[in-house]
Amino acid sequence: MLEIFLQANEALTYNHFLTQPSLQVDRITIFRTLKLFVTKKIIHRIPASDGTNRYCCNKIQKLFIQILCASRCQKNYTVKIIAPPKVKLPKGYRQQNMEIIIDGLCNICKR
């Protein structure tokens, strides 16, 4: 699974791994491996408004965010952040993570 992430240029879903003929593992093993990779910070989880989690290798995502076409194609794109947003946090609060989700329509679906 790690090799698949390293070769991917976009975020992948759980279902992507179910359809890989090279993987001879069951559903639970895929789920547990994704969870382990997230815990070890090898990949990160990208929640989406469609309810499907996507996972992206941390080699791709540093100052980038994922955007998702909200139409039928569900294609995701990686875009570079020009300047990370500044957020005023409550006193004493320590940020550990920030998630940005942008839903929209790709050029093909907006026609």
Image (cartoon, rainbow, N blue to C red):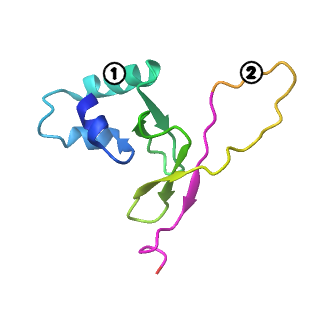
Q: Main secondary structure of the magenta part?
A: loop
Look at label 2 and name its amino acid.
Answer: Arg
Residue 29 place in picture, x, y as percent = 26, 23
Residue at the front extreme of this rendering = 82
Mark 1 element type: helix
Q: Residues within 10 Å of mark 2 (few under 14, many from 20)?
A: few
Residue drawn at x 48%, y 39% is 61
Please give left or right for residue 65 compared with residue 31 in the image.
right
Look at label 1 and name its amino acid.
Answer: Arg
Disc 1 target residue: 32
Magenta run includes residue 103 = yes
Whichever of callouts 1 and 2 sits on the residue coming sooner in the sequence is: 1
Residue 19 place in picture, x, y as percent = 19, 43
Q: Quadrant of residue 6?
A: top left
Disc 2 target residue: 94
Magenta run includes residue 95 = no
Residue 14 is marked as none
Asked whether the viewer can see residue 1, the reply is no
Residue drawn at x 70%, y 25% is 95
The one nearer the camera, 31 or 43, is: 43
Please give left or right for residue 76 compared with residue 80 in the image.
left
The one nearer the camera, 71 or 22, is: 22
Mark 2 element type: loop
Residue 12 place in picture, x, y as percent = 35, 43
Q: Quadrant of residue 22?
A: top left
Magenta segment: 97-110
Residue drawn at x 67%, y 44% is 84
As displayed, is residue 30 above or below residue 92?
Answer: below
